[in-house]
Amino acid sequence: MNEFFKAVINAEFGYSVLRVTTPILFATLGALISDKAGVMNIALEGIMLVSALAGVVFSAWTGSAGMGLLAAIAAGALVGLALAYCALNLKTDIILSGVAINLMASGGTVFLLYLVAGDKGISSSLHSKILPKLDIPGLSAIPGLGTIFSGQNVLTYVAFLSVIAIAIFLYRTPMGLRIRAVGENPNAADSVGISVKRTRYLAIVLSGVLAGMGGAYMSMGYVSWFSKNMTAGRGFIALAAEAMGGATPLGSVLTSLLFGFFDALSNTLQLLKIPSEFVNMIPYAATVVGLVTYTIRKTSRERALLARGVSAEAAKGKGA
Amino acid sequence: MPAELLRMEGITKVYPNGIVANKNAGFSVIKGEIHGLVGENGAGKSTLMKILFGLIQPEEGRILLEDKEIRIPSPSAAIAHGIGMVHQHFMLVPSLTVAENLVMGIEPRKGILLDRAKANREADELSRKYNLVVDPKMVVRDLSVGMKQKIEILKALFRGARILILDEPTAVLTPQETEELFGELKLLRDQGNTIIFISHKLGEIKELCDRVTVMRNGCHQGTFAVADVTEQQISRLMVGRDVILEVQKGAPAPEGTVLDVRDLTILNRFGKRAINGISFSVRRGEILGVAGVEGNGQRELVEAITGLGTWLAGKIRIGGRDIQGQSIKEIRELGVCHIPEDRMTYGCASALSVEMNLLSCEHDSKAYNGAIFTRTRAIRANSARLVSEYGIKCSSPAQEVGMLSGGNIQKVVVAREFSSEPSLIVADQPTRGIDVGATEFIRKRLVELRDAGAAVLLVSADLNEVMELSDSLIVFYGGEIRAYIPDVHGITDEELGLYMLGLKRQGDEETRRACHE
């Protein structure tokens, strides 16, 4: 037990929480923006996977991590566009289309990996690049805090800054207003000449871009290679995180950090002598526990509200 | 006579399912008038206005604005021509503020950001100019129905509408709110705007409009100066015969409680009290009306009684049995039948046949089921009997219910529910949006069943219906019973309106009489 606390309560652990939260946060923001437009983007998982591969392949071909990142983002946007086309133009069920994209991504990336790298498991034969880590001057000198916050991958900073950017976008810009209107009452938006289809296209593509950055981070920051199904359900965890976060930017960060914490925990516990099968289960078990707790809390809050109402009335009754 | 502002000529619209909504229909308005458009449900008035607002395209016909032919392929095009529409179902986004709803789509900008201050200022100026007072910063969700309607009108004006179409705007309002709306509309007219007012309430047409156009069966029946025609004349043109909308019914003879509700409290999904400690009872042989503006707990009450929803505290007894924890099936077996408010979701399975829908309450009855297969012949006989008894117009009992008109769908629902010899009928908006013929029929049946000894709980947002059909009334406001009226003849519309708006309430002693102890 002592070992456990030693492993968790230190600055390195804080650093690793932020490190593993990054891809979840990107995907959660992707889920948030499409949810606000009234569509559930279940394809986040597949998009991340495709982008992770695109990043590795293009950075190896061009020799530039930046080009890899751009390719990953473009891939994310393209898959988002494909999903939007199926759902909005061809009127397929968006959940089924999303499932199809996920399955295709899971098999398709292995196929492409074999074509370009000659391996069905890992891209180690490609000389792909990784995105740089940033040392923040001043901050890195502070003990503890510096260890946690400085020296993270550039995309980790981008992820947390994206939260602010997306909050401003959704709540302070005309486009954000339209996205929220379309998500809440598409008929109302339609009646004032806002194109529901175009707005949803934009939201799904943006969602793809965010998931794409999450994918790029997986293969060009978190690790320096692409491996088969490396996203390991993060796209789905993101959907849970977004729902638990109450579909708000702030809530999304907090729940992403919570899932990041459990993810980091499972990484740390692998170093202690706990069976890896058990440890690997932790982030997913945390998702289930998290969702259940969220629901229980919501119901009990409703009850508490009521109980307060009842006692207030009782007090009033006595007074009179 | 002043020149015509807008003219629609030779409009024909056939829907994909073959229903002819408009046949060579014409319509015109002159600048600065309030023009009533009346007709039964299905007469084609809504279709005509949807064409004018660009929501649907006619097969034939043309539209002239100030003598120039225009095309209206979309609502945006209609708005660009200065035509605005206030829909029956509000086109508002509940979580946004009044100002945000107003500027949606044409937002003022400051750089890349939305200029909220300017939006609020513009909303404020506009609402002052037209004397439609709203607070721009309020969130729409928290506003009353009347306020929401003002925002809808402002929304159209903000987009430069000179011709305003209002689709049955008073259907959801209390008498006081209606009065206020009429004042505002007259002011708008005096400022030079033109208003098209769709309604089937002739009293309102007489009070508000300058001219009126009558439609029947998709055709134009004539346009008159309101001062020159009587309500009877209009009504005859609308239906082609003199209808007696008043329900013929004798005095009630109530005896023995069927439904008994005590200290009932229900939470809505936001954890707020939708129903707050109400008590009342309904006896055999009486129709108890529930009056009130929609959203004051009526839906939650109906859901609790019929087993669709749960409640927090209190008791509901039907025929002496506590229904706490009982399934919908068990509640139905106590003799409860339910005409749901939303007939397409809860009332029928629209993709199934008339026959299957008529059977659906007794799908597991021995009469229709053999050991393995269903008894097709018995099912056929049952549906044939109900179709003829209730006058359901369908091509055959095998026709999909969804293909029928609203009135006939409702007849299918009613036939199924009433044929089970109910002891308690929960009728939630039983005649909403259906034609006069079906309305008359359903109301008559309700009275017959009352006379046969059923207890009827009638929930309706249509004040006329509640007043005409009920024997006694309870008035809901904010989840409470604000008044119990033992005899509907003893109250005026105005007084009822005061209770509905929460401006007036009876004491506990008086409302407690609804329990019949």
Image (cartoon, coloured by chain):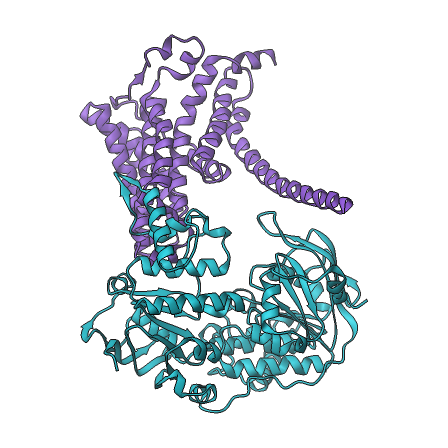
Report which quarter residue A189 is drawn in: bottom left
Q: Nearer the viewer, residue B16 or B351?
A: B16
Q: Where is residue A285 in the image (x, y as percent from the top left)?
A: 55, 32
Q: In this view, does B426 lie to the left or right of A136?
A: right
Q: Where is residue B178 in the image (x, y as percent from the top left)?
A: 49, 68
- If the image is split into quadrants, where does the C terminus of chain B sit? bottom right
Colour chosen for chain B = cyan
Q: Position of residue A241 (x, y in %)?
A: 47, 35
Report which quarter residue B308 is drawn in: bottom right
Q: Residue at x 49, y 36 (%)?
A: A245
Q: Is residue A27 left or right of residue B61?
A: right
Q: Where is residue B337 in the image (x, y as percent from the top left)?
A: 66, 71
Q: Which residue lies furthest to the right in this view?
A: B517
In the depicted structure, whether residue A114 falls above or below residue B493: above
In the depicted structure, whether residue A14 falls above or below residue B287: above
Q: Nearer the viewer, residue B139 or B258?
A: B139
Q: Which residue lies furthest to the bottom in this view?
A: B241
**Mark count:** 0
Q: Nearer the viewer, residue A26 or B68?
A: B68
Camera sees residue B380:
no
Report which quarter residue B249 is drawn in: bottom right
In the depicted structure, whether residue B119 falls above or below residue A232: below
Q: Residue at x 62, y 43 (%)?
A: A302
Q: Is residue B439 left or right of residue A91?
A: right
- If the image is split into quadrants, where does the N terminus of chain B sit? bottom left
Q: Nearer the viewer, residue B155 or B91?
A: B155
In the depicted structure, whether residue B356 falls above or below residue A306: below
Camera sees residue B168:
yes
Q: In this view, does A273 lie to the left or right of A79?
A: right
Q: Which residue is drawn at 35% across and 31% down?
A: A162
Chain the render paints purple = A
